[in-house]
Image (cartoon, rainbow, N blue to C red):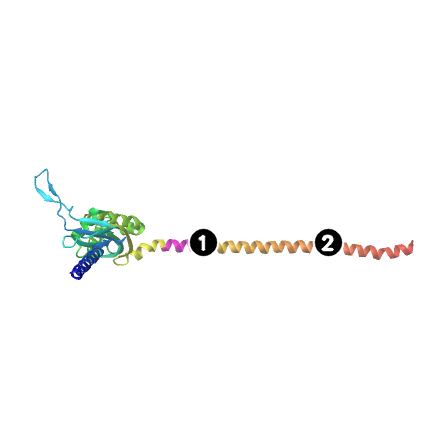
Amino acid sequence: MDSITDNSIVLAIIGIAVVLVLAIAIVIRRYKVAGPDEAFIITGRKGKSVVDPATGRMTVDSSGQRIVMGAGVFVLPFVQRLHVMSLASRRIPVAITGAVSAQGIKCSLEGVAIVKVGGTEDAIRAAAQRFLGQQQAIDQFTQEVLAGSLRAIVGRLTIDEIIKDRAAFASAVAEEAETSLTNQGLSLDTFQLQDIQAEGTYLADLGRPEAARVAQEAAIAEARARQAAEQERLLAEENIAIANRQLALRQAEIQAEIDAAAAQAAAAGPLAQAA
């Protein structure tokens, strides 16, 4: 009888241990930690009922969605579901062709945008409603929005204005696209214009006056340099001639002194004999 009781106790202890192990395994498996570049969206709770004071219509808000960023969360099994939204930056190329400028000249532009899902709960909820199941669609959506913004800004500017102030042009494009991207929970970090091509030889013709001016200034500078070099050469030759003349005069003076001394020496002998 005692052995049967002991076996029952052992089995009970083993059963409790198994249950504890299973519980710990479930806790470990259902506890998730969000990385620095991702957000967790936990669904499963019912949102709060909200009454529109204007119409009296009752709706359910999005409070049933719990947003977790940079922290851990336990997801209840069978009750809650976890979704992951990437917050990493995306480098998205943008290109358009046949955009008409304010001058009526068609041009093609290429740029690059850095876009990511916004870092606020409202932005993450908005992005999740549109892109959670197809996050790769963010690239295509951003390209479409920025392409439309590029065409709109190009139509208000001349090719000269775009080329001379690319930073202002990129800023105008970003401002034009900001509302459309923000409404979808996206944030545009930067946009840079990389290249612009105009139809025909417009860009080449645009640079010809400047190239001619630079060539003219170079020719003038070269002529002035040659003139200055010639003046320096003549001045150097003149200084050499003056130095040679001074040397010749000095040599003549020395020779005259030598001749005078020799004459005095020649006359000294007869004078001494006469004396």
Going by the numbered disc 1, the residue's amino acid type is Ala
Q: Which residues are magenta?
A: 211-222
The residue depicted at 81 percent of the width and 56 percent of the height is 263
Closer to the chain start, of discs 2 and 1, is 1
Q: Residues within 10 Å of mark 1 (few under 14, many from 20)?
A: few
* Secondary structure of residue under mark 2: helix
Residue 114 falls left or right of residue 270: left
Which numbered dot is residue 253? 2
Residue 203 pos. (x, y %)? 29, 56
- The front one of 28 and 143 is 28
Residue 155 pos. (x, y %)? 22, 50
- The front one of 61 and 151 is 61
* Secondary structure of residue under mark 1: helix
Which numbered dot is residue 221? 1
Going by the numbered disc 2, the residue's amino acid type is Glu
Residue 170 falls left or right of residue 6: right
